[in-house]
Image (cartoon, helix red, strand yellow):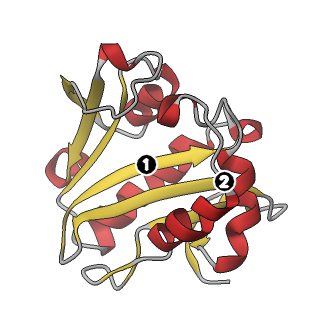
Amino acid sequence: MNIFLETTRLVLRAFTETDADPLVALDNDPEVMRFINGGQPTSREVIRAQTLPRLLHDYPCFGTRGYWAAQAKDTGVFLGWFEFRPLDDHSPAVVELGYRLNRAAWGRGYATEGSRALIRKGFTDLGVEQVTANTMTVNAGSRRVMEKAGLSFLRTFTGDWPEPIEGSEHGEVEYEITRTQWEQ
């Protein structure tokens, strides 16, 4: 197992082709996907052809991946994934933070714990200068995680939704933290 990062309760490891089944289960939970695509299921074919290649991509500026499978440290159970992906493949300066966890992991602090650990690693080991994150304005849970992880509200904006979903009419929000802010 290619472990990228461990916290008190989490192991963040590199995805492999064998992760298709837990990804299918994750992306077929309507509540998990509510703020992503309105709760629509994702087929196994899309997971194999589109999702896995994105999750397996190596970023030259990091020399490693930008998406990490999250497992419970004590049981090894797949909880979901974290994104800590450079916006430019060749520069670690600005990364996007994201997370998608199964419902059993909600409300237990995993998203905050994983996010804080990734931010710390980014600023101390990976040459990151700024971490950004965004979600739908109405996604209060995700916004709370961003704030608990130390990010501050930056702006509200309107994205281009090919197929609008419930709540998209309120726009999206962007949060950020810089290395200087984190160090203070």
Q: Which image quarter: residue 34?
A: top right
Q: Quadrant of the N terminus?
A: bottom right
Residue 48 % position (x, y): 61, 69
Q: Nearer the viewer, residue 158 or 1?
A: 158
Residue at 22% x, 25% y: name it: 158
Q: Which image quarter: residue 156?
A: top left
Q: Nearer the viewer, residue 181 or 127?
A: 127
Q: Which residue is mark 2?
A: 43
Q: Secondary structure at mark 2?
A: loop
43 left or right of 82 in image: right
Q: Which mark is residue 26?
A: none
Q: Crowding near pointer 1: few (<14 within 10 Å), some, many (20+)?
A: many
Residue at 81% x, 61% y: name it: 74
Q: Nearer the viewer, residue 50 or 26?
A: 50
Q: Quadrant of the C terminus?
A: top left
Residue at 36% x, 56% y: name it: 119
Residue 91 % position (x, y): 16, 73
Q: Which residue is mark 1?
A: 98
Separation of disc 2 and disc 1 at Cα?
A: 22 Å
107 left or right of 178 in image: right
Residue 23 % position (x, y): 67, 58
Instruction: Name the amino acid, label 2.
Output: Ser
Visible residue check, residue 32:
yes
94 left or right of 57 in image: left
Q: Secondary structure at mark 1?
A: strand
Mark found first going from the N terminus, 2 or 1: 2
Residue 168 % position (x, y): 37, 20
Instruction: Name the amino acid, label 1.
Output: Gly
Vertical position of residue 170 compared to residue 80: above or below: above
30 left or right of 173 in image: right
Residue at 50% x, 35% y: name it: 37
Judge depth for marks 2 and 1 and give the one in front.
Answer: 2
